[in-house]
Every structure is written in C-alpha cells, then in structure tokens.
Amino acid sequence: MIAAGMAYAMALALLFGLAALATERFFTLRRFPRRAVWATALAASLIVPCVVLFSSSQVSQPQISPGKVVSHEIHPGIVNTIRGDSAVAVPHVRIRWPMLPDLDLPLVSLWTVSSVSVLLFLAGTSLQCRRRMRKWRLRRLGNASLLIADGVGPAVFGVITPRIVLPRWLLSAPASARSMVLRHEREHIAARDPLLMTVAILLVALAPWNAPLWWQLRRLRFAIEVDCDARVLHHGADPVAYGETLLSVGQHRSRMPLAAVALTESASQLERRIQLILVEAPRHSIALMGVFLALAVTLCAGAAELDEPVAPSVTELRKPPPSQGPAQQLGERFAQIVKARYPQLLNEKLGRNPVVNILFKEDGTVDQADYQLVSGQPEDAINAAYYAEHFHMEANEVAYMGLHAIVSPSTGQRIVIAFTERKKPNQPYVSKVIHSPDTRAIDRSLTQQYFPDAIKSGAADRERLWVLFDSDGHVVRAGKDSSSGVALTHVLEERFPGIETEFITATDVTDQHRQPMNTLSGKPLQLFCIWLKKGSSLPHGS
C-alpha cells in the first residue's frame, strides 16, 4: 500500500505541477504575480493525497454472509492444499497502482531516512550560515543596516529576523545599481519570501522521494524572483538598467543556501527573467490566455478524477482456480499411482465409493498407501482426525488435509484421493508434493476485507471462513460456516441451488510478517477458497 500511495502522490504532484505551469503562463500574459500559483500547487500536492488516502482508508469494510446449512453433492477435481495458487489483479477501469506489500517496511524506512537526512542537511546549512554571519561586517548604507560578505549575496538570510547580505564587490558598483539591489532584497522581506521558501522546503522534506515536488520548489523559487522583479519595476526602476544590474550580479554568481532568497540565479533562469522584464506580452494574448486557462482547468480536473489507491479488496482481486499447472500435474501423478498399485479401481465398476489413502514422505515419495470402499460421500468423513488415525500419527503431525478426485476413463468410476504429509509439530512446513505459487498476500487481503473480526479478535475453531469465486477467479460471495462434518462444497451448493463447484483450497492465513495467524484456541486460522465450474450459474440471494 505504501508503494501505491507514493505513486499516487507523485502522479498528483505532476498533474498539479503541470496545471500550475499552464496557470503561470496565463498569469504571465496578464502580468499577475505568480508565486501564489506554485505555492498552492506545492501545498495541494502534499495535502490532497494525504486527505484522499486517509479518507479511502476509512471506507467501511464489506459485509459478510453468515452461513450454516447441510450437505449436498461434491464434484470431481477437488484439492485441499496448504497453499493456494497465484493471484493477479483483475482488469479494471480503475488505475491499478503498485501495491507491493512486501516493500512497505523498506519503503517506510527509506522514506524516514531520506526525510531525516534532508532535515539534518537543512539544519546543518542553517547553523553554518549563522556561524558565517558572525564573521560578516555590519554596515549602514543610507537608512539600511546590511551585512557585507566576501563572495556571498546579494541575498536575504533569516526567517524571523531577515537580514540583507551584500557582496563586497557591490560596494564599488554604481549607486543606482546598489539602490536597485537593495530595493529587490527589501521587497523579498516585505513579501515574507524567506518564510515562504522555508515552509516550502520543509514541506518537500516531508516527501523527498516525490520528484515533482522538487520541480515545483524550483519553479516556486523562480516565481518568487520574477514577482520581486515586477515589484521593483513597479516602484519606478528603469527596465534596461535593472536588466543590466541583473547581468552584473549574474557575473559574480555565488553559492547560496537552499532556503535563502537571492538575486542570483542560474544563467538560464537569469536570461528568462531579463526576457520577462524587457519583452512585451505577445499579440493575440487573449487567445493564448484562453488556451492556458483551459489547459490548467483540464489538468486540475484530471487530478480530481485520478483514482486513489485502496487496499486490495476482494472485489478487485482475482484468484485463478487450480485447474492447470501444479494441480493438473498432481492429478496426473495420482492417476499413475492408482494405475500402478490398484488397477482394479480403474477397470472394474465398484458398488461403493473407493478412497485411496496416501501418506508422503518428506522427500515427496510415497510412504504409505492403501484403499477402502465406503458408502455415501467419502469427503464428509475425512478430516484431520481421519488422517491421524489412518496413518497412525498425532493430529499435529498432519501437514494438511489433501483431497483430490480422479475419474476412470473406462468405467466412469470416481476415485477420491485422501493424501497428506507428515510434519514436525508446531514448525513451519514446506510441501514437497504440492508446488503451488505463494498466495499468502492475497489470502491475507481477502481475510482482512471480509473477516476483519477474525483478524482482530480471532475466529472460533468450528467457524470456517470461505470465499466463493467464479471460474475465472472473481469473488462472488464470502461468508462463514459452522456446520460440522459436512464438506464445505456441499454446504454452498445446498445454500445456493444451481451452482456447481469444482475446486477448493484451504490456506493457512499469515500476517504481514508471514507468521501464521491462529483461532481463539490457538489453531491455525484457515481460509477456504472455492471455485465454480465453468458455465455454472452464479449464486443468488444471501
């Protein structure tokens, strides 16, 4: 979410900056002061994303559907795994900002370090300037008290008590030039430009990674100088003489602290300032003003319409069904095991339902295997205790409850595969049999969106959290079920008549640090994901 917020903030800053640029062009033609344009753009570029992101984080969570019913028919192709399959963003008209939840902590750390570094740099620069100011000589020129320095200025230093600093070479310049320079610096003080620049720099320091903000800061600094030039000329300075003074100052250009407002600028900006002083507004300026104003409005409207990033919600996530890749390979492996060990299950029509039980070793090879014929739906009787009892191990050694179903091509007989692996109790486990992509992030997002109470307070042991997807992986329903001993697919097919389920996964939910989350009694919190068959009707009602 941090990456998305940063990308959104930079996009907004760029749009606000472009709108400010168009507005500045309009103001230039109208000879209006322009610094307020960039000050507003910079403030908006920081305030608007903060307000929008905070507001979007306060949106209420979607409601869930409580669930509890009875059993129904189950369909082939069922797989219960300890991990799910890949999750990708649903194609959507909204902008899909990069979420990258695993980068949240590094980005926050980088953000903090960069902001602190910029603030420390500014503080160090300020202290250095104060030490240097103690060595500068105080002098009065007319009724003005000035600081005279070697190789520094003309500039205004200080925010609370701003002081004008003149370079020593300016003392030998013509009196008219000194007068215009002093007028320029006094205008900075009268307009509180040092305070404006200091506030602007501190704002940028809050988000130093936002490149458009630095561009806006540069444009603001230039606008401050242009407005100051306009005020000097308004008080009667000759444009040509003033332009020559700017050139003279530019030839003695000195290094200025970032927060200082100074008469000196880069060569390109100095040239631009002189052009603005000497060149009249172009003809047909009314048409140009209309174009720039319309462009500014359009860009502001674009910023207002920019989709804000939101935490991944279940309706905006797609979790494809495990119908291909690892699940298909697993089914093919089970078919080979049955063919090699129990060919009669594939060649004979049996009166009862066959269940093949398989326990895998840690290296993924078969440790134990047998089969039995049962009456009714075998899935209804298969749970953690079934695996522990059948394979003679403790319940906490059962790595997961695996179910798969294959169909004999010759008889049409449906064969259920009940499989698991042995794990060390209370230790993380990586399956050597199931090789599904990591879906912990999307499963965590699904749980956070639909079951916030389970995240905050924990879920009851008998409470199963489920999410129902269509065949393309779009969420269609979510809810809780507390029925005991009934396959969840049966529950949903009974609850939503007409739907046909095909796949199911049971995933242990982890927190943002990838640590397992538990139920109220300390057991792993699981999320059940169920997919509809292609062509199945969608559920209706609650």
Image (cartoon, rainbow, N blue to C red):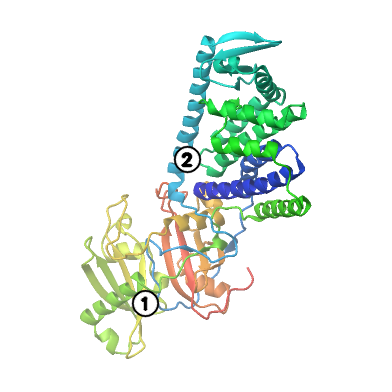
The reply to whether residue 60 is visible in this rendering is yes
- Residue at image point 56% right, 41% down: 215
Say above or below: 415 vs 91: below
Q: Is residue 451 left or right of residue 42?
A: left
What's the amino acid at mark 2?
A: Val
What's the amino acid at mark 1?
A: Ala
Say above or below: 230 vs 133: below
Of residues 319 and 269, the one drawn nearer to the viewer in this rendering: 269
Using the numbered discs, state the Cα–Cα distance from disc 2 to disc 1 in whole angstroms: 46 Å
Say above or below: 170 vs 5: above
Q: Is residue 138 left or right of residue 463?
A: right
Label drawn at residue 108: 2
The x and y percentages for residue 163 are 63, 16
Label drawn at residue 405: 1
| Quarter location, residue 325 | bottom left
> For mark 2, does the 10 Å Cα neighbourhood hold few (<14), some (14 to 19), or many (20 or more) residues?
few
